[in-house]
Image: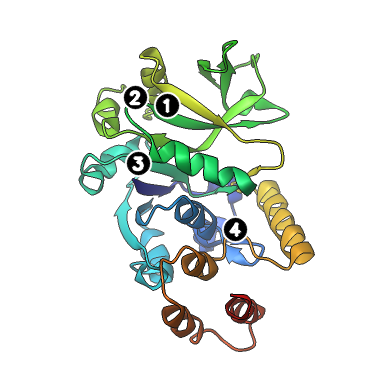
Amino acid sequence: MKGIILAGGTGSRLYPLTEIVCKQLLPVYDKPMIVYPLTTLMLLGIKDILIISTPKDTPIIKEFLGDGLQFGISLSYKIQEEPKGIAEAFLIAEDFLDNDPVSLILGDNIFSFGNQITGIKDRINSLSDNAVITGYHVRDPKDFGVITFDKNGFVETIEEKPARPKSNYAAVGLYFYPSDVVKRTKSLKPSTRGELEITDLNKAYLDEQKLECIKLRRGAAWLDAGTPQSLLDAANYIGEIENRQGLKIACLEEIALRKNFISQSQYENLISKYPDSSPYKQYLKQVLKDL
């Protein structure tokens, strides 16, 4: 399975922060925002990843992450000229996907799965011709794609931003699709907003009873860092956990080492370039000692 990080958009909800700083590189506590979706894909075992962003931001993100080889992964880059919907990512990525199944994650979405990560990995590794979306219980689902389930727990409906939601389960920014996703996206018609809507794509699978949902359990976390308040909430959440546990969330180097994407010598060489005064480097050195 390949991965896509859709890190496009103008960042208008974060203005004026995004007037001079790339949205995806804004800090979420001690790491740039884009590190969180990237490490989510890595934790799922996905190593071949395409980052899609704006003409302005793509070179900056590429300068930060490079080709990914230092983390034992492969990073490619493509530009989304203007926001035309989440589903457009599959059209932009057609050559990259080459008829492989794919996981799409939004660049401002932060996930913490806990021990549910194993079950999610097992599910996507057995992906056949079904699409799988991620559902998260939210207090006020009006601003989301709302999922309802039948008595057997299967997806019954998915409705975009309903005035009267029928459930509290929202479809959040992590999706898994089989190899026919590009073909299906090409058959979509733009919405009244002129965008290829991800909900319309999901409905196409649902109409053929090929849409499943992974419900994130209690204790799992999903955060959208796309507004000033949610960015602050995400930073506070990450900071609280890291400071209480002494363990980092979404640490690229640590995940690459623990997943055996890189060797111990590659890890040592990687972190040797970081400034000695950095607490981040001190943490990375401690990881090595613990191993």
**Dot 2 surroundings within 10 Å: few (below 14), some, or many (20 or more)?**
some
Q: Earlier in the sequence, mark 3 or mark 4?
A: 4
Badges 3 and 1: C-beta atoms under 8 Å apart? no
**Dot 1 surroundings within 10 Å: few (below 14), some, or many (20 or more)?**
few
Residue drawn at x 64%, y 87% is 277
Q: Amino acid at mark 3?
A: Val
- Residue that mark 2 sits on: 190
Q: Amino acid at mark 2?
A: Pro
- Residue that mark 3 sits on: 102
Give the spatial CA distance, label 4 vs label 2: 30 Å
Give the spatial CA distance, label 3 vs label 4: 32 Å
Q: Secondary structure at mark 2?
A: loop
Q: Nearer the viewer, mark 1 or mark 2?
A: 2
Q: Amino acid at mark 4?
A: Leu
Give the spatial CA distance, label 1 vs label 4: 25 Å
- Residue that mark 4 sits on: 17
Give the spatial CA distance, label 1 vs label 2: 7 Å
Give the spatial CA distance, label 3 vs label 2: 22 Å
